[in-house]
Image: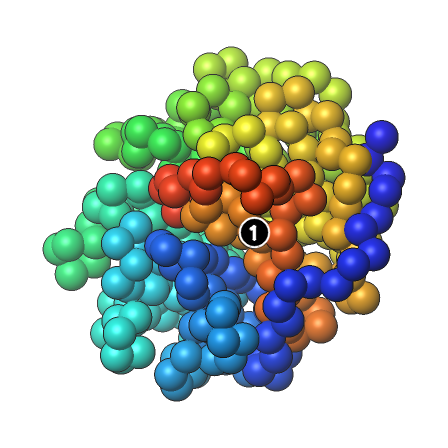
Amino acid sequence: MGNTLQKSKPLTTISGHENTIWRIAYLPGGEQVVTCSNSDKTVRIWDVEKGKQEGTSMVHEGRVYSLAVTRDGKRIVSGGEDKRIRVWDVATHEYIEWASYTGYIFCIALSLDDRLAASGGADGKIVIREMKQNGEMKHSIDAGDMVDSLCFSPDGEKLACAVNNYSGRAFTVQVYDVESGELVLGPIKGHESYITCVLWSLDGAQLFSASHDRTIRCWDTETGESTGKPWTRHTGAVTSLSVSPDGTKLASTSFDQTVRFWDARSGDPAEQALQHERSLCAVAFSPSGEFVACGGYDEKVSIWRVPWWDNSQKPVIAMPTWYLPMRPP
């Protein structure tokens, strides 16, 4: 099971970036995709139907490692090597410089109500800010080591993060209370190498994590205990996770050049995987659940229809799907 590779080509392939794509997200409605790249220092919006870039590139002064989009689709939040978070207007592509940091920004997450933004990075700090209060700081949390991925729980009460200590060979998942800033779960240990991303299930009962150890793991969000065995179909580092809008499927990308799909509850792999020509770093389900968008070292945005889709199905338009790819090495 789970070893069949889909040899067909993507429905759409869009070129434009001049370096690896690290982050990807759909805007609400599913007609536009947002990406960022490292060395070309840009955030870009793509028209999926026309297969081309929409408007001008949004440019940082350094490599861009992270982005998130608001639920209403009006703003993009991005950050990276220039140690600044910028909030971009989707309609005009203009920005405000929202906040600055002492280290590189590796990850950004928004609460589902768009009230809070969390960021983390090289200095080991997690900063939670009020979106509607000009970025006023709510908490600054010392996670101990590099923070490479963040995700708010569906109810907005907790924040999960991936914390990696290379010298100490410690790779953990930690969960903080958003209101108090206190650690409430973890450090959760189990992965044997760098954790690339963390992701909540839509019901909040499970927490998924992916790693360079080639596995995806599932954790009970009440106890922090592992639920079942690690998911082991990828043959390279797992770099990104996205949950389908109905919460039943998980998509993952890997340096093994594939997108794979999993049953979000059981961890069973889907029969088909999508084969690419280069290593992949980012994946996101469309709001309807009919498509996935992915990108990586080929510098292209690829749009695929999910293998199980039946044209008789009614699209499920739900909350924007989380996208949590890796920090670049």
Q: Residue at horizontal 30%, vertical 78%?
A: 93
Q: How busy is the neighbourhood of tag 1: few (under 14 within 10 Å), some, or many (20 plus)?
A: some
Q: Position of residue 28 (x, y in %)?
A: 35, 54
Q: Position of residue 128 (x, y in %)?
A: 30, 47
Q: Is residue 289 above or below residue 271?
A: below
Viewer-closest of 204 and 284: 284
Q: Residue furthest front?
A: 312
Q: Residue at horizontal 71%, vertical 72%?
A: 298
Quadrant location of the N terminus?
top right
Count of number-bearing discs: 1
Residue 315 picture quarter: top left
Quadrant location of the C terminus?
bottom right
Q: Is residue 90 above or below residue 263?
A: below
Q: Is residue 299 above or below residue 214?
A: below
Q: How is the image coloured?
A: rainbow
Q: Which residue is mark 1?
A: 291
Q: Residue at horizontal 50%, vertical 31%?
A: 247
Q: Residue at horizontal 21%, vertical 54%?
A: 131
Viewer-closest of 160 and 17: 17
Viewer-closest of 266 and 130: 266
Q: Is residue 210 left or right of residue 315?
A: right
What's the residue type where badge 1 is placed?
Phe
Q: Position of residue 277 (x, y in %)?
A: 81, 66
Q: Secondary structure at mark 1?
A: strand
Q: In the rendered image, is residue 126 in sight? A: no
Q: In the rendered image, is residue 51 in sight? A: yes
Q: Is residue 116 left or right of residue 78?
A: left
Residue 84 picture quarter: bottom left
